[in-house]
Image (tube, rainbow, N blue to C red):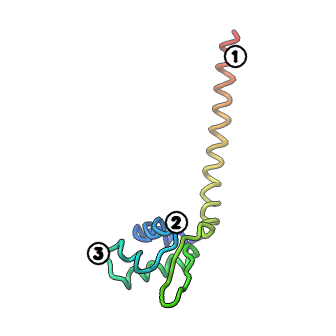
Amino acid sequence: MQAVLEAVVEPRRREILRLVRTAESTAGSIAAHFPDVSRPTVSQHLRVLRDAGLLHERRDGTRRLYRARPEGFAEARAFFEEFWDSRLSTLKVEAEREQRRRDAHRND
């Protein structure tokens, strides 16, 4: 999980993930979205994302194509959902309590 969190902390890497979330893209096409950054720097970002398990890399001749691997987020997602799920459970209990209180007032 540490590698995933370190990979997505960088804004350009998050943008790369957005670019390849729904469709495969070449390294050159991804790099074109970052005119202020050199291609070797974009390649380094791609490597970090791939090594963290967040990108799938496929070779097609000399081209490298990338697409997001949502399953790479599984451990981090499970961690954050622990907090979210408990908060939702608390909210549900409070909402049901409020509904019972309102129903009791209507029946009085």
On the image, numbered disc 2 is attached to which residue? 21
Q: For mark 3, does the 10 Å Cα neighbourhood hold few (<14), some (14 to 19), or many (20 or more) residues? A: few
Which residue is denoted by mark 3 in the rendering?
36
Residue 37 location, x and y as percent?
A: 32, 77
Query: Reading the chain from its start, which is encountered first: label 3 or label 2?
Result: 2
Which quarter shows the C terminus? top right
Q: State the mark number for residue 104.
A: 1
Residues packed near mark 2 inside 10 Å, few (<14), some (14 to 19) or many (20 plus): some
Assign a secondary structure to mark 1: helix
Name the mark nearer the viewer: 1 or 2.
Answer: 2
What label sits on residue 10 in the rendered view? none
**In terms of sequence position, does the residue under pointer 1 or pointer 2 come before the other?**
2
46, above or below 100, in the image: below
- Mark 3 → mark 2, Cα distance in angstroms: 22 Å
Could you tell whether 84 is left or right of 63 in the image?
Answer: right
Answer left or right for 101 relative to 26.
right
How far apart, in angstroms, are the residues tagged by discs 1 and 2?
A: 49 Å
- Tell me whether circle 3 and circle 2 mark residues in contact (CB < 8 Å): no
